[in-house]
Every structure is written in structure tokens, then in C-alpha cells.
Amino acid sequence: MANDKLIINRRTALKTGLAGAAALATPTFFIRNAWADDFCNMPKGKEVTFGFNIPQSGAYADEGMDELKAYQLAVKHLNGEGDGGMLKTMKPLALKGNGVLGKKVAYVSGDTQTKADQARATAKRMIEKDGAIMITGGSSSAEAVAVQSLCQDVGVIFMAGLTHSNDTTGKDKRAYGFRHFFNAYMSGVALGPVLAEAYGKDRVAYHLTADYTWGWTQEESMKDATEKQGWKTVKAVRTPLGAADFSQYITPVLNSGADVLILNHYGKDMINSLTQAVQFGLRDKMANGKKFEIVVPLFSELMAQGAGDAIKGIYGTANWDWKLEDAATSAFTKSFGAAYGTPPSQAAQTCYVQALLYADACERAGSFNPTAVIKALEGFEFDGMGNGKTLYRAADHQCFKDVLVVQGKDKPKDKFDLLEVRKIVPASQVTYDPSIFGGELGSKDAKKCG
Amino acid sequence: MKHTSKLADIALLIGFAIVVALGPVIFTPIGAGYPDLLQKFAIYGIFAIGFNILFGLTGYLSFGHAAFLGVGSYAAVWSFKLLSMDLLPAVIASVLLAGLLALAIGFISLRRSGIYFSILTLAFAQMCYNMAYSVLTPITNGETGLRVLRNDPRHLDAAFGYVSPMPSLLGLQITGWTGFYICGAVLVAAFGLSIAIFRSPFGMTLRAIKSNQNRMGYTGYSSRPYLLSAFVISGMFAGLAGSLLAATDPLAGAERMQWTASGEVVLMTILGGAGTLLGPVLGTGLIKYFENIFSAYNEQQLTAMFAFLPDGVREAVVKTTGLFVGEGWQLTLGLLFMAVVIFLPGGIMEGINRLLGLKHTPKVKSLGDSPQRDGLGEMVIEEMPPSHGAAEADKKVAEQKNAEKKRAVAP
Amino acid sequence: MDAIILQILNGLDKGGAYALIALGLTLAFGTLGVVNFAHGALFMLGAFCAVVFNKLLTLEIVRVDPTKTTPWGSPLEVKTPYVQAMLGDWGKVFIDYSVPVSIVMAIPVMLLIGIVIERGLIRFFYKRPHADQILVTFGLAIVLQEIVKHFFGANPIAQSAPQIFSGSLQMTEAIVYPYWRIIYLAFSLAVIAAVFAFLQLTTFGMVVRAGMQDRETVGLLGINIERRFTIVFGLAAVVAGVAGVMYTPIVPPDYHMGMDFLVLSFVVVVVGGMGSLPGAVLAGFLLGILQSFASMNEVKALVPGIDQIIIYLVAVVILLVRPRGLLGRKGVMES
């Protein structure tokens, strides 16, 4: 142990940069070899470091900001500061509010710029330089898939943040990656019946789809789900990413014979295309003797804010909403609101929960060893995290829980009151066979950092 | 014309190699001493060195160099998928493919000069990016990026019964510090090559094109082949950087080809000092440092850093610094660009030269406008390349013309 | 047929936006010889003038009620809008029209910003090469952008057109077009006409045009051309700014919108010919219409993905056929 202590001292000294001379005398790789004995970044001091990999610039910077706030709150609660948030409601709970396995939780953060390359670079920095035991965060599927495969290679657990593509826990799933957020397939299954109920079974849909992987999977899921309800698909058109003006794609919809427009767009694309579609009078239009409707399968509160009045009455799906009435949701909403003055977004909730779930799994496993943590998370059933009874499925590391169908509110009280929960689709209805998306998890063995 | 001696060049190269070798020690105190960032320093350094051969020497400002980097990455990953996990075939494939693409784009774009050339290269690169993101997804895997998978065929490896989970060089895995030293070695080689090109008659001709293309034309020089060669060479450097990027991190995404990535290498080069030997590498280091270290400071770390301050003051200081680091890192970068252009038109290299008080440094009026300078500010070209240089370069030209030209060139 | 007419309308509308941005860029370039990478940021600042104006109008008296809390647990704030309280129903109308009315604020603000940028920064760069100008204005663009991000966040902020313009004009059975887009087209044509009239019909404009042709001679005539050029740069900023203001109901503004338009506007300017004002306008409309047609399903079926690259493809073809763009003059921006 004496030996250990010496090394820790040296490392802490390095981190604070106080011992420049010591650093010069001792190239880091000697130290690294010394403390990377069991598995990558095994924590040996009184602290354990989490890596929060979030976008702080680019289109999703505000989502990233909310995620970081949620993580900071999670760290506080884990360390027994603040009001405890969901630690009071989570069942079963192994955490004691004294950090994780007795070690205080510290964190490092980085700006992914919403780019897969940069997300990997920041994740590597956290792993190689800051000694992060776990990486979590992200706000796009490309980032999630990229960071997840990196984490698999180096042997660090990745708890995905905002990522909605089927691929993350489908064909690109990894043993070291875990996703709490729902996916495009679940959106489709949850939304289909609600749409048929609201708009009738005899509808003709026109898809506008962002021309990249996420858009395609979303389009496919929505087609399947709506066609099962008896809808027809007249056309699916791909639009370039980041086209600020979508008018040239919207005008052909007007006379296409369709009576529903499904926008498989996300982020800024979704805000612009929805705003403009509404401007073109699509929602005041009658087609085939029915009122024309617009559907946006996935949108967040921030996007609803960006779209302004255009979001009113639009159906979509959500992972969670702060207006849910269970004890966990109100506990989390209260402590988030008290700390930052605004209610949390669904991005904040999924990130907060992911951080807690990881910490809890370590506590239950009695070790930070990733193999043990993976085992503790696989098949873990829990409740009291705002989504009802939830299962972390072992076969693909996807969480199965209720999916919310939401609708833009007609008369919002303030800018945080934009969505109304229309239906809670139970987890059993959105559960699917993991084999439909293929992919394999790969090795669960602990590794010594890359 | 004064000429730096060969010895000085060799000393420069050796010094550079020593700095690269000691990278892990040198960069640790400023928080950059970890393998991934040092790999990025080296790789983007190669990219910028290559870009500098075109922009620094000829003054032709390409706004589409990221396309070559991206194509290099894709070629390398495909080589890892289809041929072998070894670096060599990947590098060959990348450099060749990037070179071919550069030949095609350069052939068309070099018909125009000035901003028209810039826009042409930008247009080609944006086309590559947009296609890679959408229509070419079967080849590029679009948004998600092209990755190496366990069950890829790898025909060469299969034939030799060689298995490696990560890209490697002759059995040495390109990760961590090994990865850095491999990239570093390539960087030193690229730097050496760039010195050689700067000093060669070919390099002289390129500078002559920059300082006065018309005059070159009058002397009978056809500048296009020289420009095209420079363009292709710098494209190949970019391809090489792309393949190393794919080797240290086997994933190639389309965003590497976006115009912002092309813009980044322009900024790196100008920030460091275009037309100088060391400048591009310094500029690269600075920008990558900002992107990865400056952006990482968060409230917790700042509070810890300023823990020695009294309570009220500390919060204020943390808040003000928070504007410039963390999510505000781009603000600092923007201010830095402006400061460098305004006060140090020759980039960081000019600042260093001024600090060291080196002689023979002509006062630089502007960035990228300095054919007279090189790494140590030693060389001053007042005239066209001397005849021995021209003769060397003119071997391809008919002999008769050659003789006339020599007369014309001689002062 | 209807589809084609609609696409022409779309193209004209897009073209109007492109032409306005390119016009300002060309003005700055033609007069001052400065390649202004911060022009997109000026467009963005203009859009945020509309946002600020709207915020000012909807400014609220906020009182914290400590006895009650919001559903998410922080103290409840009771808000009453100022304007509504002061002007009653008139205030509501005012808020409804905030986007067009904010032009009144945007013009002086943008003129001031333009003049400050020119006097404070750009004038030191007249004699420096274009690479310097690009770098310094790019740095400026980042700084402006980050400042806006600091105050307004990264999320787009929706602005709505006045209630009566929010519908669409029914032209024929199948052709419907939003009022606001028709207004935008008319507005851009009006601004373009105004700029040309200003340069062609006023003495000030004549001097500026003379200065664009031959700065030295005009200077020798004892005319302070520098000051006029400063004003022209301010004018360019105003054109970009009002284009941004009017664009907000179509694309909700965020801090990054300038960068999104930057590359495109440079392509437009170069295709039109550096320094040629008619060229910029012509290229703007041409590229707008071509882009609209390339996005039609029939065309995309023929050439997949053509809508992704059409702008750049056209730029390459035009630059190869006409070396200086559509209407460019010789010797501008060439070494």
C-alpha cells in the first residue's frame, strides 16, 4: 500500500500541475504502467473520476449545457450533497450517498462540438489524461456509436446520453455501451396507434427525411408502424442536412395526394422544416377530404422552444417529461429546479439517470472492474427513476420502459410548458426481439487501457 | 542571395526530432502530455506542413484540402477492412488515392488563380463532403462513419494468417505512446521532406511563382506544371495525415471533409506563419491545444485552481475566466486570431524571431506574404533562382528553349 | 406545371435572400477591396436585432412571489409585460408587428456596427493581402458569434410574422404561397433597387462608383473617398442586417446562422463576378432557382443527390467557362 500511496501523490501532483519539475523528471508513461494494473483507469485514490462528454458548441450546445447541469447534480447527490434527488426514490438502491464504493466522485468534461471525431478525441483525453473510469454523454447517434466503439476498444464503460438511432444498441451495440434513452423503433411503435386513433386509419403519408443514417432508420420505423395501422406511404424524400430553407421540398407535398407529412428531421433541421411547413399552410389545408396533419416522431423541449408556435398540436414521442406525476420525477424536478431555476429536459433526465445507474452498479458489484459492472447492469430491473419499471436488457444493453406520446400544447403557460403527455405506452408494447437489428456485443473482458 | 548552410538545416531537423521525441515530457506540464493529443499534434502537423508547401510557397490558397484528408482516411480504413491491419498498405492506398484526387481537382482548379482558385477548391471539397454524407453512404457509411469490424475479410492478413485487433505497423500496435512515436517519426520525416522541398530548385521556382507569376511567364516558364506538382504533393501529405488519423483511431467520418476542416488547416498555417518551416506545426499545436485542453476547464476545476483566493473574489474570478475557457474556448480562439493578425502579421514565427532578435528578418508586412522568409528568417531571395536551379528544373523542357531561358534569367 | 411554377417561386425567394447577402458582400469588396468573412455574422446580428427588439417589447416586470413556487420548485415569478401595461391593445399590435418594425431599430444599429468595424479594424487591412483580411474577419465573426451565444444561448429563437401575414396566398387551385415569403421577395427586390438607385442616381453614389473604378484619381480631385467608403461599408452592414431581420420568420435565428450562409454567399459572389453588383444579384437568383429545381423529385430520380451539390457544381462550371464569373471585371482578385 505504501507504494500505492506514493504513486497517488505523484499523480495528484501531476494533475494539479504544481510539480512541474517532478513531471519533467518522470515521463508519464512510467507512472501509467505502474497504476494500470488491473483494468483501465482503476481508481486508487480517494476519488473516482467520471468523464462527461457533451457538446458545448454547435447546434446542440444548449442540450449539452442541460446535460452537464444534470451530471453536476448527479455528482452532488452521489457525494451526499444537496437534497439527494432520485437517490431517495430509486429502488433497489445500493448507493449510500458517500460517493461510490467509499470514493468521492469527481468529474471532467469536454466539448464534443457534436462531431464524432472530436467526441472521440475528448473521450480519449478523459481516459488517457484524466483517468476517467467511465464516459457518458453525447447528443447525437453518430457521436454515441463512435465513442461507444472507442470505449469497447480501450475497456472503459460508456453510458450513452441522447441517442435515438436503432443502431446504438442494434447493429453497432457493444458490451461496454449502455443506453437508457429510447430509440426510433420504439417511437414508431408507440406513435403508430395514437396517430391512427387521432387521425384515422385511412391516411396517406409523405415523408421528408434527413439524408443520413439516423433519418433513414427513423423513416423506416415510422413507415412500418404507420403502414401497420393501414396508412399508405406516397413518397419519401431525402433532404440535405443543414438546408436552412426547405421550401423546395415542401411545395411538392402540397399536391402530392398526401394528407399527412412526417418530418424525420432532428435539431435545427426539424425546427426549420416544421416552421416552414406550417408557414406553407399545410396545417390549414384539406386533402382527401381530411384535415392535413404534420407529425414529428422525435423532438425535445428545446426544439419545441425553437419552433415556437409551429409546435402546437404536433404529435411526437418523448423519453420522459418533467410534468409526470411520480415521486421520482418530482424529486428530480425539484432538485434541478432549485439548483438552476428551470425544469430539466429529457436530455438532462437520461444523463442524470445514467450516471446514477452506473454508480449503483459499481456499488452492487463491489468493484469498478468493468466486467463486474457490466454484469451488474445487465438484466438489472429498477424503478423510481421517473420512467416506471425499467429493465436493462442483457442481450443488447437497451433500457425497456414506458414511452411517452406527447403533443405540442395549444396554450402554454410559459416556455417550459410546451408539451402535453397524451399517452403513456407501456414498456411491454415497445419491447422487441433483439435479433431484429443484428450486431454483437463483443468481449466483456477487462482491459488495460488500449 | 544568402543561403542557409546545409548544416543549419540538418541542425534544425535534428532539433525538431529531439523535441518530438521528448514530446511526452515537454507537454505534460501544460496538460497536453497524453498520447491522443500528441498524436493529433503530429498528424495535423503533417497536414499543415503539406498545406504550407502549396500555400506558403506558391501563395495559392486552397480552401478544400480537408477533402484529401478525408479521402485518405476512407482509403486507409478500407485497406484495414479489405487488405490488412498493417499500416503500410493503408498509407500507400491513402497517399495514392489522395494524390489522384488532388491531380484531378488541381488540374481543373489551377486554371484559375486568386480567390477563384480558392472557391473552386472549396466547391470540390464541399461536393465530396455532401456526397460522402449522403449518397455515397455505401462506401463511407455516412453519418456514423466507416469503422473497422472484426469480421471484415482482410485478404492479405488471411493469406499470412496474421491477426491484429488494432491497426499496427509490422506487428507494433498503433495505440497510446507507440502510436505517438510512429506518428512522430512520420512527422519528422515529413518535416525533413518539407525542408528539402523548400531548399530545392523546385521550391525556389514555386517561390518565384508567388513573388511574380507574370515575370515567370515572360521568362518562358510554364508555371502550371510546377503548381500542379505542389498541389499534388500537398494533397498527398494530407492523404498521409488522413491515413495516420485512421490508424490511430480506426474510424473515418465525413465531417473531416467539411469546409470548416479545410478552414482549420488554413488557420493553423497562417497562425503559425505561412511560408516558414516551423510555423505550421506551431499553429497546429496551438489550435489543437485550445480545442482539447482549453475547452475542458469546467467550474469544478476552476474553483479548485483559484482555491487560494478569498471567497467573494474567487467566485468573480471563476465566473470571468469561465467566459474564456470551457464552452467559451472559441471566443478566446477568435480573439487570438485577431490579435495575431493585427500585431504579428508573420504569425507566431515572426513573434519568435522578434523575441530572439534574429537578424535578417525583414519586417513582415503581412501574413502569407513573405516569400523572403523561412524557418529561421535566414534566407532572403532578391532575385529569380540562379541558373543552376533553373537548369535542374528545366530538364523536361526542350533544350533549345532552355538555353534562351538561362540568358533571360541571368541578372 | 404547377409544380414548376411553385419551384420558380421558391427559387426567386431563395434567390432574394442570396442576392441580398451577396450584395452587401460585394459592396464591401468592390469599394474597400476587403474580403469580409464576418459578413455572415452581420446577417446574424441583423436577425438578432429582431430578437432583441421583440424581447424589449415583451419585457416584463418580474416580481418574485416568495410564498408560491413553480411546479419545478423554484420561487414563482409574476410577470406583466410593460408594453401591454402601458399601451393596452396597441401594445399587442406592436408586439405582433415586431419583426417588420424592428427594421427601424436595425438600420441605425447595423450602420453603427458597420462603421465601428470599418474604422476600428478593417481600415488597417486595406493594404494587406486577402489572407490577412480573411483571418481577421473570421476571428471577428467567431467573437461576434460567441458573444451572441453567451447572451442568447445556442438554441434557435422563434420569431413569428404578423398575424395577418401568417397565412398563404391562394393563387390558383393548386398554387398556394405564404404571404411572408412573397413579402420577403418584394422586400429584397426593393432593397436591391434602392441600393442601385443610391449608387446610380445620387452624387454620393457617383463618387463611390468613381472611387471603385479608380480610387487614386478620385482622391486627387480632393474628394475624401475614405469617408465615403466607410459609409458604404456601413450600408453593406445595413443590407445584411435588414436581410437578417426579415428572414427570422422563415428560419428561426441562432448564433450560428451566419456561418451557415457564409460559404454559400461567397460562392454566389464569385459566380457573379467579384466586385460586380449586378453579377451578385444575377448569381443569387440563378443559384436559388437552380437549387430549387435540382430538389424536385423528378430531377433527383434522374441524378441521385444532385440537390446536395448543385450549387458547387454550377460554381465550378461557370468559373471554368467564364473565368471571372458571370459579370466580373478583369484584374479583380487575381494575382
Image: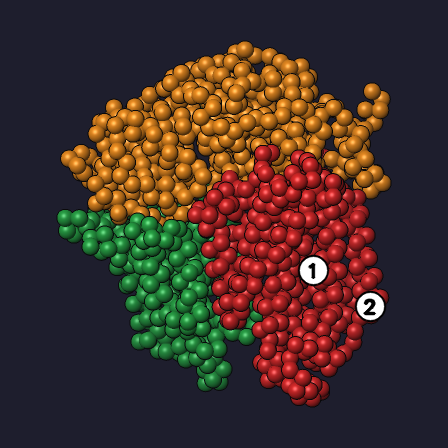
Chain colours: A orange, B red, C green
The chain letter under disc 1 is B
Q: Distance between the residues labelled 2 and 1?
A: 20 Å
Q: Which chain carries label 2?
A: B
| Pointer 2 and pointer 1 on the same chain | yes
Residue C237 on image: x %, y %: 42, 61
Secondary-structure class at tag 2: helix
Q: Mark 1 points at which residue?
A: B279
> Which residue is pictured at 50% across the width and 67% down the height?
B108
Q: What residue type is labelled 1?
A: Gly
Q: Which mark is residue B6?
A: 2
Percent across and percent down for residue C151 are 48, 44
Which callout, 2 or 1, points to the residue nearer the camera?
Answer: 2
For the residue carrying disc 2, how many other residues have a C-alpha within 10 Å: few (<14), some (14-19), or many (20+)?
Answer: few
Image position of B238 with respect to A8: above or below:
below
Q: Which of B12 and C109 is in front in this view?
A: B12
- Which quadrant would the N terminus of chain A be assigned to in this image? top right
Residue at screen point 64% across, 15% down = A365
